[in-house]
Image (tube, grey):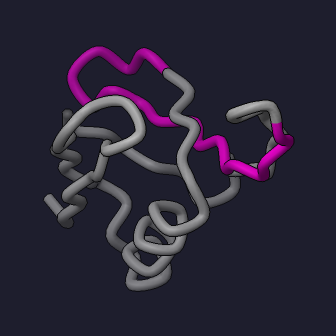
Amino acid sequence: MLGLFDPEKMEPVEQEFDGKKVQRFEYTVKDPNTGQEKYWIVSKRTSEHVDALLIERHNLLKIQRLGSGNDTRYNILAA
């Protein structure tokens, strides 16, 4: 997935996971080809990785999903 991230459009959200409330982070991501916006909710660790790239002014990111379910990881690179 290729996405255009707006650092101003991120907010913490609470979700239930395995019967517990956990904090996640919701990003509004725009498809650079169509302009359509989607929401992407991620863990704190993934959010820290995205934020580090956004701080370096890399707003166009390439995201590759690895695994599924509880074993999902993301490879995130500046595009």
Total labels: the figure holds 0
- At a point 69% along the width and 33% down the height, the residue shown is 18
- At a point 31% along the width and 43% down the height, the residue shown is 72
Nearer to the camera, 43 or 59: 43
Q: State the quadrant of the C terminus.
A: bottom left
Task: Magenta stretch: give its range.
Answer: 20-37
Residue 75: percent from left, percent from top: 19, 58
Residue 30: percent from left, percent from top: 42, 31
Q: Is residue 59 above or below residue 73?
A: below
Residue 22: percent from left, percent from top: 78, 48
**Direction from residue 18 to residue 14 in the image, left or right:** right
**Direction from residue 21 to residue 59 in the image, left or right:** left
Secondary structure, magenta segment, majority class: strand
Residue 37: percent from left, percent from top: 50, 21
Nearer to the camera, 63 or 57: 63
Q: State which quadrant residue 1 falls in.
A: top left
Based on the picture, tell me whether residue 26 belongs to the magenta stretch: yes
Nearer to the camera, 33 or 64: 64
- At a point 29% along the width and 51% down the height, the residue shown is 73
Q: Residue furthest front?
A: 19
